[in-house]
Image: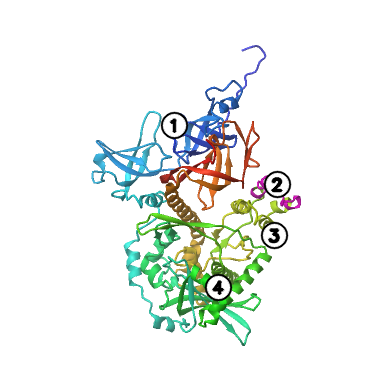
Amino acid sequence: MAKGRKAVRRKPKANPTGVLVSRAEGYGFVATAEGEYFVPHSAMAGAFDGDLVELAPISRKGASKGDGRAGARAGATGEGAGLPAARVLRVIDRAHDTVVGRYEVAEPFGVVVPADPRIPYDVFTLRSDYPEVPDGALVRVRIAQFPTRKSAATGHIEEVIADAADEVRVGVDLIVARHKLETVFSDGALAEAAAAVLDAEGALVAGYRDLTERFVFTIDPADAKDFDDALSLDYLEDERLWRLGVHIADVSHYVPWNSSVDLDARRRATSVYLADRVIPMLPPALSDELCSLKPGEVRRSMTADLYLNDAGEFVRADFYPALIRSDARLAYNEADAILLDYKEAVAAGGDLAWRLVQCSRLAGLREAARTRAGGIDFATTEAKVALDGEGRPVDIVLRRKTDATRLVEEAMILANEAVAGCLETRGFPCLFRVHEPPAADALGSLIPVFQEFPWFTRPMEARLVAGDARTIQEILAASADRSEGELVSSLLLRAMKRAVYRPDNLGHYGLASEAYCHFTSPIRRYPDLVVHRMLRAALTRRPEKFDQEMAALPWIAEHSSDMERVADTAARQSQELKMAEYLSAFTGQAFSGVVSGVASYGLYVRLDCTAEGILPVRALGEEYFAFDPVRYTLTGEESGRAFRLGQRVPVVLKSVDVPTAALEFALAGSR
């Protein structure tokens, strides 16, 4: 060492880390604090989709020294164009401890081939350990050793999901297995459900009010079986008030705390509505039968009588258990038909039509009042795939808000607010539905996008970042009738925080409610069942073991919020799967779509039927396209042609991978 020169201990340079997003072709992408990296197939080092990985940047073939983009240009037509390349050094945290796949006999092994093509590693088991598992079965395998550069993955079979793959059901079966959704009730829960009885006389003796003479009706989707809410409406001449009755299935009577049914329901936390089936929270003997408010059947209910004046203003509420009998069961389209031709329907007489008309009028007044208070209504379109008798898709049906859906929604919102307010005023425990204001940075990131539109003014910027609800309303209204309207609504919706359950009340930002809870769906949501128990205890007396349930509220809130996310994801994935299956028959056809997302590797395009797919950057042309992550644009360096969020683009459906519900588009008219 030269004289006078001090030895310096260098601090090791930290490698970039991030979550790996794999493609079915075998390569992947990792977004890190240092930027996004492309990981070629040969550099995955046994990492699975979703793993948290540490990367080591590598140079691409053809890159000149000191010019990272030269390598990107060499592959400019590839999906990773414009990104630096990296290899996986190590997996920091695994996203998967189990894998679902097809079991193939290959003596002396049983090989599990993952159903998810983004996991390109077979898992080996010893055939002698599982001789009873048939070839071709759908199984879940727990990984004992993850793959390395020198060894294969090994594991142990945990469950045989199906003896053989049913071509029609297997896709949704995989979604159920991947999310570990419970599909079988315990023997104790089934026995308790089977033994449950109505006992109308016992209910009246116990203090239930007899409302069987009140005209009650239900409005639900046409294919619904679990009717957990019903409505009634009467005008009280002496008080000059409308009495809106919201009658909810009295599930808490049949499901006491810590019973077998309760323990099963608590774990599930919610029913899961998949494209081709429903996985109920409660055994069908309760969910579809004894608790369901079927027409013509006497049922126990927890009733909220909500009193409103003719201007739709809430005056007071009364809560009590009751016996009801539904007089009419309407599907949403039937209710809408009556409201559309209301003059003729009312003239024809009967108890139903005028009640529907007045419920709809009051709902409109309630919605307007909520908007004035700062409530935000996002115009969303829900797509549901229609299936034939065998479970094959035959159409994609779009659902938008109608007078009938608004009628039910506003009644349920008011009931939920009233119950939460009642428990809050009494200082009684409750599971609140909490929706916090959006984060300033989430809203601020939208400003560069919105600046592209002429209706977005500078004064809106600061108010938007501050989360001012009326500014968000103004933005939604200004964009509603424009081509970018649905995109703006979608971006703002994504910027919102997710509503969650909590034992403490923090209000509901989106509804502009000071206190809100879920009370109206105890057949399919566990928090609603908890709220029913709390309300009953507040009205009468605290039952035995009530303190146990109070102590469990924080855990129940967190678990229910988590399971709601799982259920929503599984439901969405099942619809996307069936949508892809339906669209596979339209490969090669042209569509008009909207750019719903922009990334360095291409554009996400959303069709009018809500199906979304990738338009890879290689399909945009031979030139290099630069990605602007602030304005979400891809711009050709030579032509200056730009693609941006909300832009209409003509596309051709190039390919559909049904198992992963992946659609790939090409620009219409391109070679």
Give the number of the mark in front: 1 or 4. Answer: 4
35 or 125: which is nearer to us?
Answer: 35
Please say if 384 is above or below 642. Answer: below
Q: Amino acid at mark 4?
A: Leu
| Disc 4/disc 3 C-alpha distance (Å) | 30 Å
Callout 1: helix, strand or loop? Answer: loop
| Residue under pointer 4 | 339
Please say if 515 is above or below 216. Answer: above
Residue occupying image coordinates x 45% and y 64%: 524
Q: Amino acid at mark 1?
A: Ala
| Residue under pointer 1 | 45
Give the number of the mark in front: 2 or 1. Answer: 2
Q: Residues within 10 Å of mark 4 (few under 14, many from 20)?
A: many
| Disc 3/disc 2 C-alpha distance (Å) | 18 Å
Q: Amino acid at mark 3?
A: Arg
Q: Residues within 10 Å of mark 2 (few under 14, many from 20)?
A: some
Task: List x then y, in percent, for residue 607.
Answer: 53, 49
Q: Is there CB contact under 8 Å for labels 4 and 3? A: no
Q: Residues within 10 Å of mark 3 (few under 14, many from 20)?
A: some
Q: Which mark is residue 470?
A: 3
| Residue under pointer 2 | 451
Q: Earlier in the sequence, mark 3 or mark 1?
A: 1
